Amino acid sequence: MNNRERRRHERYPCSANVEIDWGSEVLRASIQDISTSGMFVATPNPLWMRAQFSARILLPEVVPIDCIVRRIEPGHGMAVEFESLSDLARKSLTDLLGKLSAE
């Protein structure tokens, strides 16, 4: 079974920036694709499997989100799952996915 067949939610190409809070550092990366349950973060230095972190998706509004790393592509990035979404973050994400699905 390939990754596309295992996915529960459709992913959409997305070119937003994301800031990752990692200890006392803020790591900057970009989103390659996104769904209602997660995203692929393009970064040459991905974190490790099951690493948990808080992030901010930088859209016209900032969307805070808690994530966990589910898959690593060394030198390319990491697939992360959203762990919890506030009502506001869920609405912002739903609005974004609506726009991306219409493109």
Image (cartoon, rainbow, N blue to C red):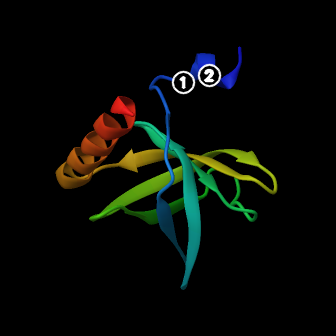
Residue at the extreme right of the image, as rendered: 74
Q: Which element type, helix, strand or loop, lies under badge 2?
A: helix
- The three-letter amino acid code for the residue at tag 1 is Arg
Task: Tell me the residue that label 2 is attached to.
Answer: 4
Image height of 79 relative to 19, above or below: above
Task: Tell me the residue that label 1 is attached to.
Answer: 7
The residue lying at 57 percent from left, 72 percent from top is: 28
The residue lying at 51 percent from left, 53 percent from top is: 15
Q: Look at the numbered discs 1 and 2 and tell me whether their residues touch, using CB distance below 8 Å.
A: yes
Between 68 and 77, the one lying in front of the other is: 77
- The three-letter amino acid code for the residue at tag 2 is Arg
Q: Residues within 10 Å of mark 2 (few under 14, many from 20)?
A: few
Q: CA distance from mark 1 to mark 2?
A: 5 Å
Give the number of marks: 2
Q: Residues within 10 Å of mark 1 (few under 14, many from 20)?
A: few
Residue at the extreme front of the image, as rendered: 103
